Amino acid sequence: MTASDLQGADQGFRIGQLINDTRYRSITFQVITLILLVLGIGYLISNLLANLADLGQDLSYDFLAAPSGYDINQQPIPYDSQSTHLRATIVGALNTLIVAFLACVTATVLGVIAGVLRLSKNWIISKLMAVYVEAFRNIPVLIWIIIIFTVVANVFPQPRDFRGDDATASPIFGVVAATNRGVYVPRPYFTNGFGLSDEDAIAEVGDDAVAQAAAQGSVIDWLVILAVLIGSLLATRAITRWADRTQEKTGKRPTTWWMSLAAWILPITIVCWIMGLSWEIPELRGFNFQGGLLMRGSLIALWLALSIYTGAFIAENVRAGILAISKGQTEAAAALGLRPGRIMNLVILPQALRVIIPPLISQYLNITKNSSLAIAVGYMDLTATLGGITLNQTGRAIESILLLMLFYLTISLLISFFMNIYNNSVRLKER
C-alpha cells in the first residue's frame, strides 16, 4: 500500500480515491466500461425497434407456428412440407448437431493417430502424415467439401446397379447399400418400447398422428438407452476408483477390464432385449432403396471433409503435446521394461492432454461453426432452414438471425463448458 493510500485511509473515503487509489481504480474502470457497454447495447436495441416501427413491423416469432411449405432432404425426425417453421428449425438444428458430433469424433481419432505417427521413427510413415497435415490444413475446407461430394456422387454406383442377376454392385455385408444418392444402413427400432412403437408407425406410414406418436415414443426409448450408457460410464469410473484404492493399500492393482466390459455390455444388452430391439433393413424397391436410414451424399461429404480438415489441425496439437513431455519420462518408462506402445498410452499421452485439450476445444468449436458451409452441397442444416428458406419466405430476417446466433452461441458455450470440466479433471494437481 502506498503512502497516498495510507493517508486516504486516515482521512476516510473521498470521491477522488475512485481514480487515485489503487484499491478502487480497477473497479471504477470496470464499472464505467460496463455502463458504457449497457448504454451502447440499449441504444442499438432502441434504434432497431424505432426503425422497425417506422416500417410498420415489430419483433415477433409468430411465424414459427406457420406451415413451412418446403421439404428437407435429411430428416432425423418426421417432417413434411405442412410442418411448422419451428419443426423445420428443429430438424435443421438436429442435422447440424449430427454432422458436428460425427465430425468431432472422427477428427479426434484421425488427429490423434496422425499426430502420433508424425513422430514415428519410420521415415515413410512420418512423411506421409506430414503430407496429410500440410495438404489438408492449407486448403480451404469448402473446397474439400465440394471435392468429396463430387467423388461420392460420381464414384458410388447407382441404385439400378444393385438390381437383377446381372447386378454390378451388392450391399456391403448384405445390409449396407452405398449409392450415389447416399448410404442406406439398417435402422434400429423397438417393438416393446415406450409409447407407440416404431413397428406400428411402419405399418401405418400414411397416418401422420401415428407417425408423430411413434416418433415421441422412440425419443423416450433412446433417452432410456442414453441413461443406461451414462449409468455404465459411472459404473466403470467407480470400478476404476476401487482399483486405485486397492492398489494404494496393497500395492497390487486388481484386473478390472472384464468388470468394465461387463458394465458396458450387460446393461445395454438386457435393456435392448426387454425393449425388443429390431432392425429395418433397406431393400431395393422400384428405382431406389426403401427402408433403413439414409445418409445422403451431402451429409457424408460434409462429415468427411470437416473430419479430415480439422483432423490435420488436431494432429499438430497432439504432436506439440507429445513433444512438450520431457524425454526423461520416456527413458524412465523404458527402463522399467514398458514397450513403446504402452509408454505412449500410459505415460506420454496422459501427461500431454493438458497441452492438447485447450486447443482441441477450439477445433471442436470450429467444426460446429464450419458445418454452416453445408448449404454448398445441399445439406439442410440450421443455416439452410432457419437462416435460409424460412428467412426468405417469412421476411423475418432479424428474428431468424437472432435465433441462429443464439443456437451457435449456446452450442459453443456448452462445448467449452464440458471440455473445460474434462480439462480440469486431467490437469496436473499441485500441492
Image (cartoon, rainbow, N blue to C red):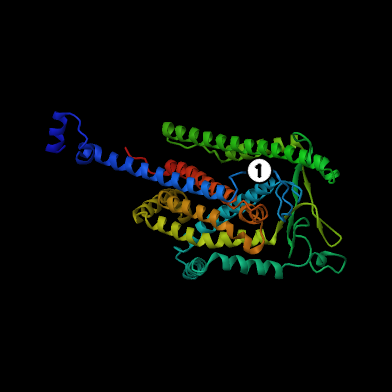
> Can I make out residue 190 in this image?
no
Q: Give residue 254's position: percent from left, percent from top.
A: 51, 36
User: Residue 414 location in percent, x, y?
Assistant: 51, 44
Q: Horizontal placement of 85 versus 327: left or right?
A: right
Q: Is residue 425 left or right of residue 275?
A: left
Location of the N terminus (image quadrant): top left
Name the residue located 70 percent from the left edge and 39 percent from the top edge.
Answer: 219
Q: Is residue 72 above or below residue 255?
A: below
| Element type at mark 1 | helix
Q: Residue at x 76, y 34 (%)?
A: 195
Q: Which sits in the foreground, 134 or 30?
A: 30
Q: What residue is at 62 percent from the left and 64 percent from the top?
A: 376
Vertical order, 376 against 268 (above or below) = below
| Up/down of 238 relative to 179, above or below | above
Q: Residues within 10 Å of mark 1 (few under 14, many from 20)?
A: few
Asked whether, in this view, residue 164 is left or right of residue 375, the answer is right
Q: Which residue is mark 1?
A: 62
Q: Quadrant of the C terminus?
A: top left
Is 160 or 63 nearer to us in this picture?
A: 63
Residue 209 position in % (x across, y down): 80, 40
Label tally: 1
Which of 224 and 415 lies nearest the eye of the viewer? 415
Is residue 358 in view from this perspective? yes
Place of residue 140 in the rendered image (x, y in percent of width and height, measured from the top left): 53, 67
Q: In this orientation, which residue lies closer to the viewer: 204 or 261?
A: 204
Q: Quarter of the image holding residue 72?
A: bottom right
- The amino acid at mark 1 is Asp
